[in-house]
Amino acid sequence: SDPYLREHLHWIVTDIPGTTDATFGKELVSYEIPKPNIGIHRFVFVLFKQKRRQCVTPPTSRDHFNTR
């Protein structure tokens, strides 16, 4: 497969209270519906626990997003 785009950012929500859901968090990048064209695609949701509120700067582009 062609890894040209690799990871693509679909959504960023921060500061989600532990006793609620994402609707109570701060949406930094609005949700974008996945649009697979052809071939096999893998979609991964990553959730990180924050020890405290942090200043998170959203990336300038959704393409080539890197979770590492």
Image: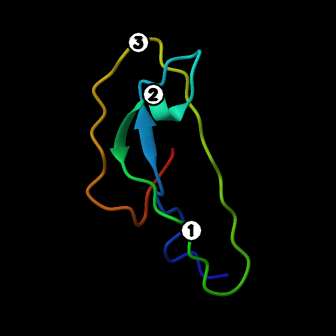
Q: For the residues labelled 2 and 1, say whether their Cβ atoms are less than 8 Å apart.
A: no
Q: Which mark is residue 24?
A: 2
Q: For the residues labelled 1 and 3, say whether their Cβ atoms are less than 8 Å apart.
A: no
Three-letter code, disc 3 = Arg
Q: Which mark is residue 51?
A: none
Residue located farthest toward the right when viewing the structure as drawn:
40
Is tag 3's residue or tag 2's residue first in the polypeptide sequence? 2
Q: Residue at x 40, y 66 (%)?
A: 63
* Location of residue 57 in the rendering, given as x and y in whole percent from the top left corner: 27, 39
* Location of residue 31 in the rendering, given as x and y in whole percent from the top left corner: 45, 55
Query: 52 or 3: nearer the eye?
Result: 52
User: To which quarter of the image does residue 6 belong?
Assistant: bottom right
Three-letter code, disc 1 = Pro
Rounded to the nearest angstrom, the CA distance separating label 1 from label 3 is 30 Å
Q: Quadrant of the N terminus?
A: bottom right
Q: Is residue 45 above or below residue 50?
A: below
Is tag 2's residue or tag 1's residue first in the polypeptide sequence? 2
Rounded to the nearest angstrom, the CA distance separating label 2 from label 1 is 23 Å
Q: Residue at x 41, y 24 (%)?
A: 15
Three-letter code, disc 2 = Phe
Query: Which secondary structure lies at badge 2?
Result: helix
Is tag 1's residue or tag 3's residue first in the polypeptide sequence? 1
Q: Which residue is mark 1?
A: 34
Q: Residue at x 45, y 27 (%)?
A: 24
Q: Is residue 56 left or right of residue 16?
A: left
Graded by Cα atoms within 10 Å as few (under 14), some (14 to 19) or many (20 or more), the crowding at tag 3 reads few
Q: Which residue is mark 3?
A: 52
* Location of residue 5 in the rendering, given as x and y in whole percent from the top left corner: 49, 73
Give the label, 1 or 3, closer to the camera.
1
Rounded to the nearest angstrom, the CA distance separating label 3 from label 2 is 15 Å
